[in-house]
Amino acid sequence: MRGHFVNVTFTPTAGAAAQGSYIQGTFNSAASGDIYGQNLNVVLGASATGSTGDIFLQNVSYSPNAAATTAVTNLYGYRVAALAAGASQTVTNTYGFHGNVASGTNKYNLYMAGTADNYLAGPLRLASSLRTAKVTVASAATPDIFNAAGNFIDYTGTTTATDFPAAPQAGMSVTLYCAAACAFTAGTIIIEGLPTGGTVTMAAGAIVTVYAITTTSFKLTYSLSGSFTITGTGFTVNPTGTAIYTVTNGQVSLYVPSLTGTSNATTFTLTGLPACISPTSVRRMYAVDAVDNGVAVYAMPYWDGAAIQLGNGHQGVAWTNSGTKTLSSGVVLSYSLD
C-alpha cells in the first residue's frame, strides 16, 4: 500500500499542451534568503524503524499504454532550459545540475548505470588532475589487461604474451610497468619495430603501452633502459666496463666504454649483452675507432647471433695477437632488434 501527500491524475484535452503539474512563482520583492521554485525534503520520523526499501527523493518514469500511437520527437527524463539571466540581472554562477555529495564509500555525485552513450557538447573540466588507478596483473599467454581495475599496471612475471582478451571498446590504452623480463610476440599484437612472429623480451623497469586498435587487435609500443657489465675477449686478461643501453620500439642505442688490454688472439669480441638488446639475427653496425698494436684502425662491429664481433677494418683482417688492443672511448652502437 502506498500513501500519497499529493496524487494528481488527469486526462489532458486533445490538441492542447499537456502539463501534469505546473508551478509558476512570481517574486516581486527582494528576497532576504534563497528562492526555491521547488524544494523537496523527505523526513523519516522518530518512529521509523526496521528496514525499508530504496528511498527516492524524486523518481521519474514513463509508462505509455501499449496501444498508444503518438509519435514522440524527443523523450526527456529531465530537461533544463537555458537559464539565461535577465537583461538587468547579474548571475555569478549558473548550474544546470549541481551535486554536493561528500566523498565516501559507495557515494557518487553522478552515477550513470545505463549503458547508453553519454554526450557532452561542451568541454569536460575537472577540479583536479585525472588520476588513474594502479593495479597488478600477472604475465600470461593472454593477460587480461584491458579489464583490470586501472590502466596503469604493475606487470609481474616472465610469461610470453601472444594476445590479449577483448578490450571493452576500441581506443583504450593501458600502460604496463614490467617487473621482470617479460616478453611479447607479434601477431594479433602489432609490436612497433618487430615483424609478425618475432618476440621482444623486456627488462625490469620497461614501460609498455598497449592500444586497442579494435576490441580484438592491439598495438604495442615500449621503451626500456639499463646497464650491464660488458666484457672484451681476445686478451690475456679480458677487460670489462659498464655499458648503458636504451631501447625504443626495437631500436637499440648502446654505449660501450673503452676496453683495452694485451691481445692474445686475432679476434675481438664484446660479450655479456642481456636478452632485451640481443638481435634475433645478424646485425651490422657503423665503424668505430680502435687501436691494433699501436695502429689506429676502424673496427667493424656486427652481431653474429651470440655476441658482437669487431672486425679489423672494412676488409676484416685479423687482429694482432700480441701488443695492445683497444676499443676507443665514446663508442655508441645503434641497431635494430629485428
Image: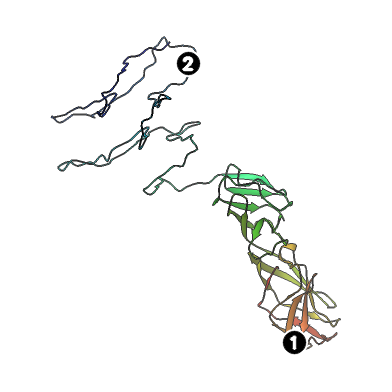
Within the image, what quadrant is residue 256 found in?
bottom right
* Residue 169: image location, x then y, percent: 55, 47
Whether residue 28 is situated above or below residue 332 in the rendered picture = above
* Residue 179: image location, x then y, percent: 68, 52
Q: Secondary structure at mark 2?
A: loop
The residue tagged 1 is 314
The residue tagged 2 is 52
**Nearer the camera: disc 2 or disc 1:** 2
Whether residue 174 is situated above or below residue 7 in the rendered picture = below
Camera-side residue of 275 and 172: 172
Q: Quadrant of the C terminus?
A: bottom right
The reply to whether residue 208 is in sight is no
Camera-side residue of 36 and 311: 36
* Residue 283: image location, x then y, percent: 73, 74
Amino acid marked by disc 2: Thr
> From mark 2 to mark 1, how far is it between C-alphas?
88 Å
Q: Secondary structure at mark 1?
A: loop
Residue 238 left/right relative to 297: right
Camera-side residue of 74 and 172: 74
Residue 162 left/right relative to 153: right
| First of labels 2, 1 by sequence position | 2
